[in-house]
Image (spheres, rainbow, N blue to C red):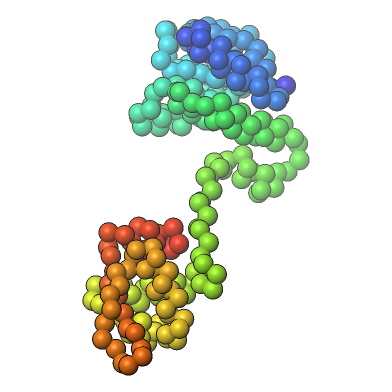
């Protein structure tokens, strides 16, 4: 069981954080303190693995407490839980070895994420085996939010081909063009290129109007509608 010391000068916030901590498997709030002096006293008594530390509080503030912990060589890890969000404070916290930094107010899920990541690191550091790179990466790496998945294209359209068609359209530099003009630039048949033009027209990325063509061959001219290009970005990313 990981023993936690909560340091928070607001009793209601302290109680909320205690409830949050004890909802996560493997953690127990062993003690609480309402100021920096009380935090240092509780640490000197021993038995604490993790300190959840506010910054703005009476007596030595959280950063000063963290500096004293490091100067004394105390074997305790620190997660800062604070409303302070200026980069100077965050930078100093990093340099003093805080293992995470939670900005108030935060949701339970964010604290759970911090505690679970700490629990994994805590277990690894106490296992005598030689760690693998994957294990080390799990300790040091911050999880990234998954990139939103690109929406599906209509059946028969290919993302790579759509990108090629769009690059060819941009090469007209705003001048009107026909499906035949575009097919020559992309190097595919007019039948194929029309499928992509229909898709782009349906997104309102292209303006379309009739143009003079041969007998029995309806011809349209297309132009890019710059104000609507954002509709294409989910399909192409930065290329749109």
**In which quadrant will I find the C terminus?**
bottom left
Residue that sits furthest to the front in the current view: 216
Image vertical order of residue 122 relative to residue 143, above or below:
above
Q: Could you say which is closer to the camera, residue 74 or residue 112?
A: 112
Percent x, y for residue 23? 66, 22
Residue 146 vs 183, above or below: the answer is: above
Q: Is residue 125 visible?
A: no
From the viewer's perspective, is 119 left or right of 157? Answer: right
**Which residue is at 52% across, 45% downward?**
145
Taking depth in this image into account, of 157 and 54 the one nearest to the observer is 157
Q: Residue at 51% of width from left, 9% of height from top?
A: 12
Instruction: Answer with the quarter of the image where residue 195 lies.
Output: bottom left
Position of 96 with respect to 75 (left or right) is: left
Q: Residue at x 41, y 72 (%)?
A: 198
Camera sees residue 216: yes
Quadrant, the N terminus: top right
The relative height of residue 190 versus residue 227 in the rendered view (above or below) is below
Residue 148 position in % (x across, y down):
50, 51
Q: Where's residue 88, x and y in %?
A: 35, 29
In depth, the one of 2 and 45 nearer the eye is 2
Residue 214 or residue 8, whichever sits in front: 214
Q: Residue furthest bottom?
A: 215
Q: How many marks?
A: 0
């Amino acid at each position: 069981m990981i023993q936690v010391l909560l340091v928070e000068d607001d009793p209601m916030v302290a109680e909320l954080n205690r409830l949050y901590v004890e909802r996560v498997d493997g953690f127990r709030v062993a003690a609480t303190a309402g100021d920096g002096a009380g935090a240092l006293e509780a640490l000197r008594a021993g038995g604490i693995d993790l300190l959840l530390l506010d910054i703005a509080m009476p007596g030595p503030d959280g950063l000063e407490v963290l500096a004293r912990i490091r100067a004394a060589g105390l074997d305790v890890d620190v997660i800062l839980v604070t409303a302070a969000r200026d980069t100077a404070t965050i930078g100093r916290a990093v340099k003093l070895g805080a293992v995470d930094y939670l900005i108030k107010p935060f949701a339970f899920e964010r604290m759970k994420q911090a505690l679970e990541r700490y629990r994994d690191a805590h277990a690894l550091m106490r296992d005598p085996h030689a760690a693998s790179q994957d294990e080390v990466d799990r300790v040091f790496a911050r999880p990234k939010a998954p990139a939103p998945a690109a929406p599906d294209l209509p059946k028969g359209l290919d993302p790579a081909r759509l990108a090629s068609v769009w690059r060819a359209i941009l090469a007209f530099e705003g001048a009107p063009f026909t499906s035949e003009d575009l097919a020559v630039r992309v190097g595919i048949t007019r039948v194929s290129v029309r499928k992509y033009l229909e898709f782009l027209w349906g997104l309102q990325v292209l303006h379309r109007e009739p143009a003079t063509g041969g007998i029995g061959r309806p011809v349209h001219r297309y132009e890019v509608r710059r104000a609507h290009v954002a509709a294409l970005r989910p399909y192409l990313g930065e290329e749109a």
